[in-house]
Image (cartoon, grey):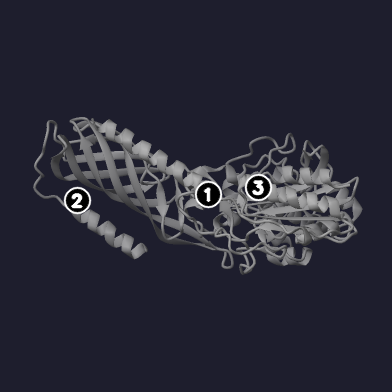
C-alpha cells in the first residue's frame, strides 16, 4: 500500500524536475554588426563569422557568458565578449571581466618554474626532495616528472572527499600542503617516468617548490609574470570576477541556487588551478611567452617537448583539423583555454562562466574561420 | 547558524530522554533501534540510536514518529571529520515495510586552513539533511535505504546523497 504513495511522490518529483528544466531560457543577446571589431589579427569577414559562432554557441549550449581573444605573436589583440557576467543575466560581459581559468593556471606555473631553471635556482632533472622535504616518495620524482605528468602521484581531484567537501562547503580553504602530503603518502600509481597520467597534485607541489625556493608568495610571482592575472582567493577578490554557473545534476544547482563563487575548488587546486584572468590578458601573456620574451627559446622548446600529449605546462590538442598546443582549464562554473597554432603564429583564448563547456572545440572551430 | 543548529540538536536530544513507552500499534512493536549507517545523515559512517516517541494509525497503516541521535566519522577517508547526526522521522507502513520520511540536522567538525598563518583551525558546521526512503523491519534486523540530499544553507550549497542503514530494533 505505501508503495503506491511512494510511486506517486516520485512521479510528482519527476514532473517538477521536467518543469524546472523547461523553464531555463538561454541568454538573450545579439551582437549588433557594428560592435564586431575587425583588426589585422582578425579581418572583417572572419570577425563576423566568429561573432555569429559565439552567438549560436551561447544559445545552443545555454552558456551565461563567453569571451574570445585572438592575436598573432607580434600583433594587436582582437577581443569579443558575449552574454552576461552574472547568472541573473543583468550585467553585460566585457573583455575586462575576469574568469577563473582552472588548469590553465598550470601554464603560468610552469613558466615560473622554467624561469627559475633558467636562473639556475632549480634543475629539471634533480629530485624534488632537493628543495622540499618531508613528502614521501619525492626522492625519485624530478621537476620534469611533475611538469610533464609522469610522476605517478595521485590526482587530488580524483579523491571523493575533495569533491564532497568542496561542493558542500564553498568557503572551505584547503591546505595545499596537506592535500599534497596526503597524495604523496598514498604512494605512486606507477614508477616515475614510466608513463603519463594527468595529476593536479604535480602542480600543487611545483607551487610549494617555488614558494620554498624563492621565499615569496605565489601571488607575487604571478603578478610579476603577467598583467591581468589574479591568484584568488589567496589575494583580495577583484570586483570584476564574474559568477560561474554549473549545470551539474548531483549539486542540484538547477533547483537550489549556490553561492556564485567558491574558495573551496580554487584552494584545492592552488597553483594547479586557482588563477583568474580574462581571454585578453591570457592572449597577451601568450604573445610574450611564445615570442620568447619571458623565457628564452631553448626553455620554451623544453616546454613543448611532448610525451604523448603532455609537454611541460602544455598539452597538445587535435581540434578543428589543426594540431594546436596550450592548456585548457575547468573549475566548477568556469572553463578557459589558450591554444597556440605554431605555423600561423596565432594565439587563441576563450573564457566561459558555464560548465560543462568544450572550449577546445570552440577554438578549433574559430581557427577554421581564420586565414 | 551553528548556534541555532546546536539548540535544535539539544531539543532533539531531549526527545530521546527515557520515559514511559508510547502506545504501540500493530504487531512486533519495537521502540528502540540502533542503526549503523553508511553515508546518509553523516558522511561517511554513523552509529545512531532511534527512539519512537508516538505511534498511531493513518489511512489504515501504522505511523510511528521517532527521534534519533548519534555520532559519525570517516576513519578510512581523506578528511577525518567527526559529525553528530540528529533528526526526527515518520515511519508509515504495515508491520515490516515502511516509508520513512525524515528531517535531519548534522553538526560536523570542519578544518579551515589559514594560508597566511600556515595553520588549520577547527570549526563546527551544520547541515540540513531531509530524507525519504524505505525501511524494512520492526523488531530484530532493520534495513534501510534513503535518498538524503544534503543542504548547507549557511554556505549556499547542496549535494545529492544516499544513505544505507543496518540495525537492530528492540
Q: Is residue A247 left or right of residue A204?
A: left
Q: Are marks 1 and 2 in contact (CB under 8 Å)?
A: no
On whether disc 2 and disc 3 are found on a single subunit, the reply is: no
Q: How many numbered discs sit on the rendered protein?
A: 3
Quarter assignment of residue A173: bottom right
The residue identified by callout 1 is: A24
Query: To which chain does the residue with label 2 belong?
Result: B
Name the mark nearer the viewer: 1 or 3: 1
Whether residue A197 is visible here, answered yes or no, is yes
Q: Is residue B69 left or right of residue A343?
A: left
Quarter assignment of residue B142: top left
The residue identified by callout 2 is: B16
The spot of residue B103 in percent (x, y) is 30, 49
The residue identified by callout 3 is: A200
Few, some or many residues within 10 Å of mark 1 (<14, 14–19, 20+): few
Query: To which chain does the residue with label 3 belong?
Result: A
Q: Is residue A200 left or right of residue A68?
A: left
Query: To which chain does the residue with label 1 belong?
Result: A
Quick check: A312 above or below B6?
Answer: above
In space, the residues marked 1 and 3 are separated at their CA atoms by 34 Å
Q: Under tag 1, what secondary structure?
A: loop
Q: Nearer the viewer, residue B61 or B81?
A: B61
Q: Nearer the viewer, residue B133 or A36?
A: A36
Q: Residue at x 53, y 63 (%)?
A: B119
Q: Earlier in the sequence, mark 1 or mark 3?
A: 1
Few, some or many residues within 10 Å of mark 2 (<14, 14–19, 20+): some
The spot of residue A364 in percent (x, y) is 78, 43
Q: Under tag 3, what secondary structure?
A: helix
The spot of residue A19 in percent (x, y) is 45, 44
The spot of residue A174 in percent (x, y) is 55, 56
In space, the residues marked 2 and 3 are separated at their CA atoms by 47 Å
Q: Nearer the viewer, residue A67 or B103?
A: A67
Amino acid at each position: 500500500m505505501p508503495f503506491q504513495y511512494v510511486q506517486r511522490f516520485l512521479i510528482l518529483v519527476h514532473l517538477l524536475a521536467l518543469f524546472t528544466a523547461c523553464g531555463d531560457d538561454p541568454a538573450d543577446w545579439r551582437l549588433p554588426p557594428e560592435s564586431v571589431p575587425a583588426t589585422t589579427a582578425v579581418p572583417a569577414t572572419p570577425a563576423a563569422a566568429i561573432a555569429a559562432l559565439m552567438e549560436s554557441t551561447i544559445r545552443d549550449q545555454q552558456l551565461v557568458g563567453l569571451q574570445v581573444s585572438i592575436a598573432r605573436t607580434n600583433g594587436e589583440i582582437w577581443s569579443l565578449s558575449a552574454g552576461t557576467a552574472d547568472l541573473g543575466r543583468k550585467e553585460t560581459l566585457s573583455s575586462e571581466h575576469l574568469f577563473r581559468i582552472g588548469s590553465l593556471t598550470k601554464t603560468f606555473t610552469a613558466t615560473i618554474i622554467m624561469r627559475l631553471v633558467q636562473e639556475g635556482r632549480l634543475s629539471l632533472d634533480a629530485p624534488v626532495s632537493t628543495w622540499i622535504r618531508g613528502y614521501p616518495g619525492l626522492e625519485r620524482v624530478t621537476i620534469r616528472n611533475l611538469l610533464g605528468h609522469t610522476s605517478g602521484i595521485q590526482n587530488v581531484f580524483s579523491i571523493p572527499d575533495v569533491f564532497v567537501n568542496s561542493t558542500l562547503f564553498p568557503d572551505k580553504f584547503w591546505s595545499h600542503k596537506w592535500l599534497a602530503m596526503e597524495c604523496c603518502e598514498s604512494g605512486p600509481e606507477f614508477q616515475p617516468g614510466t608513463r603519463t597520467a594527468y595529476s593536479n597534485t604535480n602542480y600543487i607541489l611545483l607551487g610549494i617548490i617555488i614558494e620554498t625556493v624563492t621565499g615569496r608568495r605565489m601571488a607575487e610571482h604571478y603578478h610579476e609574470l603577467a598583467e591581468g592575472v589574479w591568484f584568488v582567493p589567496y589575494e583580495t577578490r577583484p570586483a570584476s570576477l564574474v559568477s560561474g554557473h554549473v549545470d551539474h545534476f548531483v549539486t542540484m544547482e538547477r533547483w537550489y541556487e549556490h553561492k556564485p563563487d567558491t574558495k573551496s575548488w580554487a584552494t584545492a587546486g592552488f597553483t594547479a588551478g586557482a588563477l583568474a584572468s580574462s581571454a585578453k590578458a591570457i592572449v597577451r601573456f601568450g604573445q610574450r611567452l611564445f615570442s620568447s620574451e619571458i623565457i628564452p627559446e631553448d626553455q620554451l622548446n623544453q616546454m613543448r617537448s611532448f610525451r604523448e600529449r603532455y609537454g611541460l605546462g602544455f598539452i597538445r590538442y587535435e581540434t578543428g583539423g589543426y594540431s594546436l598546443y596550450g592548456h585548457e582549464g575547468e573549475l566548477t562554473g568556469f572553463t578557459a583555454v589558450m591554444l597556440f597554432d605554431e605555423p600561423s603564429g596565432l594565439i587563441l583564448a576563450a573564457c566561459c562562466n558555464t560548465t560543462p563547456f568544450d572550449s577546445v572545440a570552440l577554438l578549433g572551430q574559430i581557427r577554421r574561420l581564420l586565414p | 547558524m551553528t548556534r541555532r543548529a546546536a539548540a535544535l540538536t539539544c531539543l532533539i536530544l531531549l526527545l530521546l530522554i527515557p520515559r514511559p513507552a508510547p502506545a504501540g500499534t500493530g504487531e512486533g512493536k519495537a521502540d528502540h533501534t540502533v542503526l549503523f549507517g553508511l553515508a546518509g545523515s553523516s558522511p561517511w559512517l554513523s552509529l545512531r540510536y532511534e527512539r519512537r516517541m508516538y505511534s498511531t494509525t493513518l489511512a489504515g497503516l501504522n505511523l510511528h514518529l521517532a527521534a534519533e541521535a548519534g555520532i559519525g566519522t570517516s576513519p578510512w577517508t581523506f578528511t577525518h571529520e567527526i559529525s553528530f547526526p540528529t533528526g526526527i522521522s515518520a515511519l508509515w507502513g504495515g508491520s515490516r515495510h515502511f516509508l520513512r520520511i525524515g528531517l535531519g540536522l548534522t553538526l560536523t567538525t570542519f578544518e579551515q586552513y589559514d594560508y597566511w598563518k600556515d595553520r588549520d583551525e577547527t570549526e563546527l558546521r551544520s547541515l540540513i539533511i531531509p530524507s525519504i526512503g524505505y525501511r524494512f523491519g520492526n523488531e530484530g534486523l532493520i534495513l534501510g535505504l534513503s535518498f538524503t540530499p544534503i543542504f548547507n544553507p549557511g554556505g549556499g550549497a547542496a549535494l545529492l546523497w544516499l544513505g544505507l542503514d543496518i540495525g537492530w530494533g528492540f
